[in-house]
Image (cartoon, coloured by chain):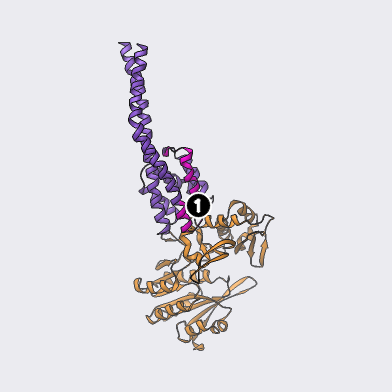
Amino acid sequence: MDEEYLISRFYSAAALLPQGLRDTFERLSDREKALAEEFRLRAGLIPSVLLPEGEKRLGTRTVSPRDLIDTLEIATESSLHSSKESIKNGFVTGLGGHRIGICGTAIMKSGEIDGIRAVSSLSVRIAKEIKDCGREVAPRLIDNGRFMSAIVISPPGGGKTTLLRDLVRQLSNSGFRVALADERNEIAAVRGGVPQADVGVRTDVLSSCPRDQAVMLLLRTMNPEIIAMDEITAPRDARALESASNCGVGLLATAHALDVSELYGRGLYRELISEGIFKKAVVISRTNGVRSFSVQDLGGLR
Amino acid sequence: MTKIIGALMVTAATTSLGVMSAKRLKRRVRSLRSLVSALDIMRSEICTRLTPMPELLELLAAQTGEPANIFFTNCLIKQRSMRGRPFAELWNSALRATEELELNENELEPLIELGTALGRYDTDRQGEAILAAKKRLEGFLQKAESERDRESKTRTMLGIAVGVMITIILI
């Protein structure tokens, strides 16, 4: 991929850090900047960058709690209050679509997480839009002009969101009306109503809405042919997908799993596969740092 | 003839000084009032609608009265030019740049303190900080209003009287 583009994404993510920390990261070589996947900031410890070969610690300056708060303030343009719902889920999406995972002390209210105080660490994931990475995958999900519902799987950090974004773009540009339930605003990175990432010409984006509610809302209002979303994790997501499938809408989603047998081993996904809701699986694997995609038919598992 | 012209000029000068001083009292009242009502909008937007800060500043710049609207416009400009800097820094910088507010250091203090809370905390804490700042500004507003009612006419009349007195002494 274009190294210049990757370096520009590095700088876009580094711009979310306070000046002192930013300087530490910007001392990396161009090669490392292009390969960087995440910035890891832990209070009281030296910051590190996640590269394909693992975490690399940088400099001698330790991260202060103030650095963490400043990062969140910069990333949300002083609008931490607007990200209240996503903070309950442990993340905020910063400018440029970079997702920032948050750890600290959970504030509990009526048995549920109501927020996070005393932030102790942050993980800034550098959002990268890799256009055409799904070029060979997208046609294999279409049969006789009909989209075959598919689930994209890989372990965390495997590139599911990147592939999902490009598949949405490819399918949308090839004529399907796609509705994107972008709960974390990480796929389209909508800002002021305009997606910052290219998600295609026939894509409607509903961001920052819980997936299950987003699916029902999109079904009712946007007349989609395909509904796409990231990371199905809860039974309520699965129930919403069942409803959408019964309405004849194609589904495109992602899940954490190493391969199809591991996915099938989990109750939540086994039901979705057994009921024929997902017909194909796109498996992302990585060999020597190089990603490859394979499309598998799930019919045999029913 | 020269004496009459001179007397008129002196009287006009001292009268305009008195009028300007009275007007300044009125402008301070208007400034504090516009800021108090802006804080009301700010609190409801942050606590109820969770409006992001750039959108909130735009809204305040468009919907509040003068000179608060000038201050929020300056905040917006600073936010764009000081990207990556803490909000409190740009807020303070905009406060200092907006001379139209005509506030003294005591009156600026609650606003400076508010800047350290905005955008960094949850809605409850920001709401509390806005209320605290509003309460203090309302105190200053009451004081400024009674000062205006008490001294506005006096200052104008004093300007005229001083002019007349100087004229009498000189003639």
Question: What amino acid type is highlighted by mark number 1?
Answer: Ala
Chain in orange on the image = A
Residue A210 at least partly seen: yes
Residue A72 inside the magenta-drawn segment: no
Look at the image and give the colour of chain B.
purple
Residue B102 inside the magenta-drawn segment: yes
Where residue A89 sits in the image (x, y, percent)?
Answer: 51, 68
Where residue A142 sits in the image (x, y, percent)?
Answer: 44, 79
Q: Is residue A234 above or below residue B59?
A: below
Q: How many marks?
A: 1
Where residue A4 sits in the image (x, y, percent)?
Answer: 57, 58
Which quarter of the image is occupied by the N terminus of chain B? top left
The quadrant in which residue B55 appears is: bottom left
What residue is drawn where x is 65% and y is 61%?
A: A48
Residue A129 at least partly seen: no
Q: Is residue A202 above or below residue B56?
A: below
Where residue A211 sits in the image (x, y, percent)?
Answer: 45, 72
Instruction: State the residue in front, B159 or B95.
Output: B159
What residue is drawn where x is 51% and y is 80%?
A: A281
Instruction: State the residue in front, A223 or A17.
Output: A17
Density class for disc 1 (Cα within 10 Å; few <14, some 14-19, many ≥20) is some
Circle 1: element type: loop
Q: Which residue is mark 1?
A: B117
Q: Is residue B150 left or right of residue A74?
A: left
Q: Is residue A294 above or below residue B59?
A: below
Instruction: State the residue in front, A83 or B115.
Output: B115
What residue is drawn where x is 66% and y is 56%?
A: A62
Q: Which secondary structure is most common in the magenta stretch?
A: helix
Magenta part of the chain: B101-129
Q: Is residue A109 above or below residue A236?
A: above
- Subunit ID for the residue under disc 1: B
The quadrant in which residue A148 appears is: bottom left
